[in-house]
Amino acid sequence: ILNVEQSPQSLHVQEGDSTNFTCSFPSSNFYALHWYRWETAKSPEALFVMTLNGDEKKKGRISATLNTKEGYSYLYIKGSQPEDSATYLCAFYNQGGKLIFGQGTELSVKP
Amino acid sequence: DGGITQSPKYLFRKEGQNVTLSCEQNLNHDAMYWYRQDPGQGLRLIYYSQIVNDFQKGDIAEGYSVSREKKESFPLTVTSAQKNPTAFYLCASSPRPIGNEQFFGPGTRLTVL
């Protein structure tokens, strides 16, 4: 089993703080890296699908970067809001077609 | 509306009984997946199917079985051989090619008494 590691496991911030999470994944057999947001009582929803080394993607206040050579991706949230509270999952897609998830980072944003 | 449905939302079974979890999608996606989530762990892949009538074992397939007779449907059977079946089960689908984002159902929480 290939390991996808996320850190930190949980994070508590105040509204307005900026924050970032890390996802580490195997640097071999890379096909794609996914980020998902999973809010309580909802289904996980895709934030980003990243495929190229050096990719940077942005959606509103959330952005992500990708380094496939060293096997890591960062997710940034600028000016966190209470509605950003969720578990953020990264997942490594290998060339065999399997998506392997990290354990997630649980973000709590206090007003 | 297009989407993925899983039923039921909550399921209770006695130990030793087989149980089948339903997953249906009307997104016309080729690939479908079953994951299991346990407290403090990420989603772990049970089985996946890239095309009708074909499926592959994921990382924790022991004690589970699937079928993919129709593009829209990918039911998961939790057999009595699964040693610790109580968990939250998520079904997902994705369009071709591989690597595309996955779309998730609402999940089924299975409790074996």
Image (spheres, rainbow, N blue to C red):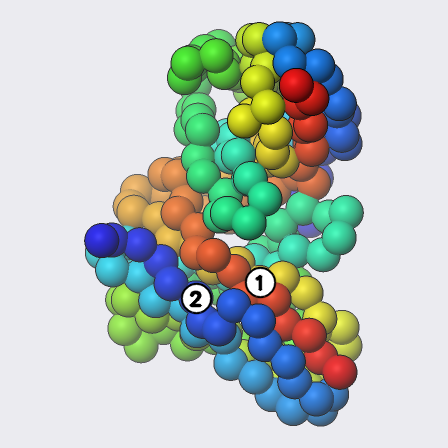
Q: Which residue is nearer to you in this view: A41 or B24?
A: A41
Q: Where is residue B77 in the image (x, y as percent from the top left)?
A: 53, 79
Q: Mark 2 lies on which chain?
A: B
List x then y, in percent, for residue A100.
58, 44
Where on the picture, by quarter, is residue B75?
bottom left
Specify whether residue B39 is in view: yes
Viewer-proximal residue, B28 or A95? B28
Q: Which residue is drawn at 27% across and 66% down?
A: B71
Q: Can residue B52 be seen in this view?
A: no
Q: Distance between the residues labelled 2 and 1?
A: 9 Å
Disc 1 chain ID:
B
Circles 2, 1 touching at the beta carbon (< 8 Å): yes
Residue occupied by mark 2: B6
Report whether B6 appears left or right of B45: left
Query: Which residue type does callout 2 highlight?
Result: Gln
Q: Position of residue A55 (x, y in %)?
A: 45, 13
Q: How crowded is mark 1: few (under 14 residues within 10 Å), some or many (20 or more)?
A: many
Q: Which comes sooner in the sequence, label 2 or label 1?
A: 2
Left or right, B69 with respect to A46, comes to left
Please give the label number shown on residue B89. 1
